[in-house]
Image (spheres, grey):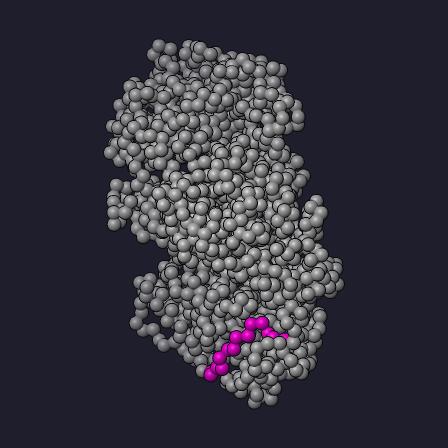
Amino acid sequence: MLEIPCPWCGLRCESEFSYGGEAHIVRPENPEALNDEAWADYLFMRKNPRGPHLEQWHHVYGCRRWFNVKRDTLSYRIECSYRVGEQPPEGEI
Amino acid sequence: MMTKYSFFNLVRNALGHHEGWAPAWRSPEPGKQYDVVIIGGGGHGLATAYYLAKEHGITNVAVLEKGWIGGGNTGRNTTIVRSNYLWDEAAHLYEASMKLWEGLSQDLNFNLMFSQRGVYNLGHNLQDMRDIRRRVDANRLNGIDGEVVDGIELKRRIPILNTSPNSRYPVLGASFQARGGTARHDAVAWGFARGADSFGVDIIQQCEVIGIRQVNGCVTGVETNRGFIGAGKVGIVVAGNSSVLAGLAGFRLPISSHPLQALVSEPLKPVLDTVVMSNAVHGYISQSDKGDLVVGAGIDSFNGYGQRGSFPVIEGVLAAIKALFPVFSRVRMNRQWGGIVDTTPDACPIIGRTPVKGVYINCGWGTGGFKATPGSGYVFAHTLAQERPHSLNEAFSLERFTSGHLIDEHGAAGVAH
Amino acid sequence: MPAGRLKTNETEGRITLSRPITFSFNGKTLQGYQGDTLASALLANGIHLVGRSWKYHRPRGILGSGTEEPNAVVQLGIGARTVPNVLATQLEIYEGLEASSVNCWPSLEHDLLSVNGWFSRLMPAGFYYKTFMWPKSMWMKYEQAIRRASGLGVSPNLPDPDRYEKTYAHCDVLVVGAGPAGLMAALAAGRTGARVILADEQSEPGGSLLYSRETIEGLPAMKWVAGVWQELESMEEMKLLRRSTVFGYHDQNFLTIAERLNDHLPRWECRGARERLWKVRARQVVLASGALERPLVFGNNDRPGVMLASAVSCYINRFAVAPGSRCLVFTNNDSAYGAALDMVDAGIQVQAVVDCRPRPRGVLPERLRQRGVEIIAGSVVVNVKGTHRVKAAQVMQLPAQNGILKGEKRLIHCDLLAMSGGWSPVVHLSSQSGARARWDDARACFLPGMPVQQERSAGAANGSFSLNACLSEGSFAGREAARLAGWEWDNQPDPPSSSMQLEEPVQPLWLVPSEYAPGRGPKQFVDMQNDVGAADIILAAREGYHSIEHVKRYTALGFGTDQGKVGNINGMAILAQSLGATIADTGTTTFRPNYTPVTFGAIAGQEVGEKLFEPVRKTALHEWHQARGAAFENVGQWKRPWYYPKSGESMQEAVNRECLATRESVGIIDVSTLGKIVITGKDSGEFLNRIYTNAWKKLAIDKARYGLMLGEDGMVMDDGVTIRLSENRYYMHTTTGGAAGVYSWMERWLQTEWPDLQVFLISVTDHWATAAVVGPNSRRVMMGACQGIDFSAQSFPFMSSREGTVGSIPARINRISFSGELAYEVNVPANLGKPMWEVLMAVGEEFGITPYGTETMHVLRAEKGYIIVGQDTDGSVTPDDLGMGWALSKTKDFLGKRSLAREDCMREDRKQLVGLLTINRTEVLPEGGQIVEDPDAAIPVPMIGHVTSSYYSACLGHSIALALVQGGRSRIGEIVHIPLAEGRVIPARISDPVFYDPDGERQNV
């Protein structure tokens, strides 16, 4: 069971959280201006890396904040977490 | 030439102290150039190679496996085989696979221990029962066997199943596919490997692809840890690692890789002679021929390539198994493990062309790939050989995520395992 | 005293002779003592034959003395409390214990399937892949026979009467194992004041010291242990767990421990839970899990009476049991000489020590020589004689070169063969933690790899086998772990020491050579439980199964209940030999949890049964419904009244009555389970505009509007009515099942995409009790029950909301309808739900107010063609498919809008919501039924849709159904067919989905 650092509450067990997948996917400003490929890219295409991953978690049985985590998908090691609106470490997106 | 497996040959070799058996497959050095290179030596990749050779006469083929064949999800799943999918497209594909399963041991001359002991999908609420009816009726009209079983009949057939109305989520009934069952997972990889090898396919283990070489948007071969291997066409069949390989080729996929866990008990004398699956309380169980109870869980929510998941999933699935089978409470869990499943937004696979000419992909089987192994190989071999999809996999193109023509097997098909 | 019990005045080991215990094995009543395991008690009674092997059904005895045991697997107890596959070596006996052998019939001595042994040549590794294929139809029969022969113990066939519990714990240092290293680690860490958990799988601390005759600080080992234990017990932050196996090492220093609380007690002494699962998050971990002795792989090495040398020591010193009277020792290292000395001192005749090393000259061999025991150096045991018990062993000289042995075979009579193939550190947990075990040539074993989590190994688990090393490494590891967790103490005393002994290095001996080529002589077992012999591994390699994982899977090596604890390393080495590779190259199979098996019950814990499998959610009115005899339906976690049968009424009759009463006069339903979310803030209207498909900004205060919510993929996700309570305050209803999901969904968009919007969400589902009063007389009921509200149609129109009181209870009343009738939803604080309900019932009495459940609610809404998300939709349905294109704003963006413009969402032949009227008006279609045009078409029959909802409508006197049908709206009037599984076909006519009051006049009165 992962131990996840909520930027608001500190280290908590994974069972308090729900997972939100890849972070920093920004909803297009004007969806109607996109062609189907660009919309599908936003909707479905994911990086799904084997290694460092910027992802969203929701402290659902806690403060109910969504936030971002940098976690390695192979070692499961969590490097850091940061609030929504904050930049990921080293400007990675 | 392949040594035929038979009782006669077993006796003959016993007299020779089993010193005369030939290797089931060769361990060749990689060649310079192949017509087709299959990346991924799991069941699907090996089946693809086998059917490329057998059905299409394409034998200048290499299967590249970064570890040992059958070492990924093929050797980690809970071995359930069924074809009772809801939507026509999925049902036809899985049923084609089921028909291949039914003659596969003989076709491969390798006993895959395909055991048609039946599969029950339990319903725990009224909506479950509606979905079960919908699916069973659809299956029957598609020529797939299926039956709706009520709670009383279920109890008669599986006396140790808890059908008490006082359960938290009482079992109201089930769908039953009699032709469903289990198979010996490792044997599937080995049987296809031996079959493919006998046609001259090179199975190259410990060979990891680290690049996909292209000229003008057209594939020319793959870079590996054992050097460059030229290829006319490349088929990517790497399940959980699909996004990684797609990344090497320069495109993205609508795939998330998640841990999927399973566990076995200690071996017991026969106590459960069928497969029982429940979506609502989330667990499924069967008993292997060795006697272990084989238990599967749902996926871990987070993306993960670690081939392990989190403990609460195991706690949840055993609570579910204990709810369904209170008699197993004192049975002990012996071993747990995880695989990496490649999930798609509509719980259906992607089989077909990619943005790179000559590169084809077969992925997205999620939690349900094992049962599709022969069918998947069959249609993918066709796709590679003919450079266009078989009618069975036409609907499973990557383009469907753009057009919106998804085949959503989430809602109604129950657990997609 | 039984024959096998040592009569020694000096020590009775760890058993209590004054406390005899009666137990039975295979129906025979026997005696042991407090402190015995079943294995020690059986040996004391001269019983060596304990079980049968898995494949060949060979007679098997007791090999070891602990968790590593592959052979002595028994069935414990009978009835609901029986436990399959218990290790006799771990099972503490108690008064009245009943155990029996597994996998034999009709009896252990005369097992029918031992004929398998005669045909064993036909059953090499993987034989079943090569046969049983003809004729094809016969496989299921073959399989049945295979299944009957497989498996070991028997599952209970009654529900488990015992309870299991779980606990979480956090600690600074978790120490695994209470042997010399673990005790020292706990002591050193505990002395700093750190919070420490020490877990050990045995009944008492000591580990290998339990059978050691060494001294520590001048004290006999167990006296020293007692002193340490006492100090540990006195520490405030120390938690000592006995009979507790750390079975899993998960990510981020999360470890799982199974504590067995009751299994060592007679039934009448059992209290509380049977087992407790500890879920521990440790800052630092010290792994002092010890080492396991390896067997040697020679002919018939599985015969009862062939034991690990350390086990022989253990039985003598710990249990005062003589496992034999004449013993031959076979070893490749010095430790077995200790066992030989133990035997000599206990009065057991040691015939000789056979040592493969040419010149064993350590301290222990010398000591044994002085005792006059013959040491046959440079030799090996090649074969064992005897079937149910060892009778003799054949010894041959090793040649200078490797190869097949030639020359004289010396026969040595014995009834016990103690063997030692060296020691394997228990690297299971460190491997599970992610450290990759590395091969050490000098010590001929795998050592723990570089830690990737906060852990370190100490003592034998670290390959440091001497007692001195265990004590000092343990002490250091405990200190270091505490320091890293933030605890230090400067006054740490030096670790104690014991007498030093010079050792001759171990000489690896994997497959013991003999006069035969492998596979031609007697079977040489590697994995005893699974009957995997050396020849099987060599055959696998020959057939191309080169990866250790392939070999494991092809031969079943290490797949038993023991997980290959004693056999795997030998197997890996034999594979490496036959491939001409090194063991380091071949590597290990992956170490996975569990270290030893753990009951399903312990892992499931208390989250079982009607009450605790998942929380039950009840409304404030639940007891009222119960008292009224309601049948309940599970909707998500909620219990909702399904219908209220009067005595003698069938469900259909009850539902007909409820429907008619509601349509004709007035009904009442508890709708408290609907999701309720309060949305406040100045941008609430804008937020709703984005979340819902329709427009919200112009909604007047106290007015209500129906909203449809889509996923970004354009598919319908949820729906409900939202009311504007004030300028910046809205009250949203969601579906019962969708409440939690919708709440999270909205939070996500607000927090991650639209943080600039000033909107706040509060989930108030449980805060309110809500009753819907429905039917033409509902206004009268409301007028009678409420104060302060003008209920006239003009001042309180449809789709509006008012505040007032019901009785004296403050209430918000919404005039909304899910039935097409005049209806009011009354919301009061949840704790006042019951008085509110009772007021409404009392006032309604004169109109025959009828409580109704979800089934009637479904019928009423279906008569009106209203959908239920999740029943009439399945995640692949767009608003337009439902005929709800009217709800889509053309002027603003909303979630999912862009997806609706994709090619597939615009197809003409998409499935659309329609009604179905059966030709036979009383025939009710099955929900889920598939719809076809031509029921006689050849399979696969094209299906054009399915029935989503179907009921008998008492109001209409007709069966009605909703369905999704391809291009359905243009097919209205067409006849379609619904073929049933049993072969019957029901014809029905496609109709508009609104069956009742199509102009919607009734709700507007």
Q: Judge whether residue B55 can be spotted in this image.
A: yes
Query: Does residue C503 show up magenta in the picture?
Result: yes
Task: Tell me the residue at 51%/48% (across/down).
Answer: B45
Seen at 40% across and 41% down, the residue is B357
Q: Nearer the viewer, residue C994 or C237?
A: C994
Query: Can the viewer see residue C355?
Result: no
Region in magenta? C501-514
Q: Position of residue C780 (x, y in %)?
A: 44, 13
Q: Nearer the viewer, residue B41 or C950?
A: B41
Left or right? Give the position of C385 relative to B175. right
In this view, the residue in front, C74 or C915, is C915
Residue C565 is situated, as x and y percent measured from the top left of the image, at 54, 65
Q: Residue at x 59, y 69 (%)?
A: C64
Indicate whether B289 appears above or below B256.
below
Where does the C terminus of chain C fall, quadrant-wise?
Answer: top left
Q: Position of residue C810 (x, y in %)?
A: 36, 24
Asked whether, in this view, residue B350 is left or right of residue B148, the answer is left
Magenta residues, dominant SS class: loop
* Residue C810 inside the magenta-drawn segment: no
Image quadrant where one finds the N terminus of chain C:
bottom right
**Residue B8 % position (x, y):** 71, 56
- What is the count of numbered marks? 0
Residue at the spot 44% in from the left edge and 39% down from the top edge: B353
Residue C551's place in the image compared with C163, above or below, is below
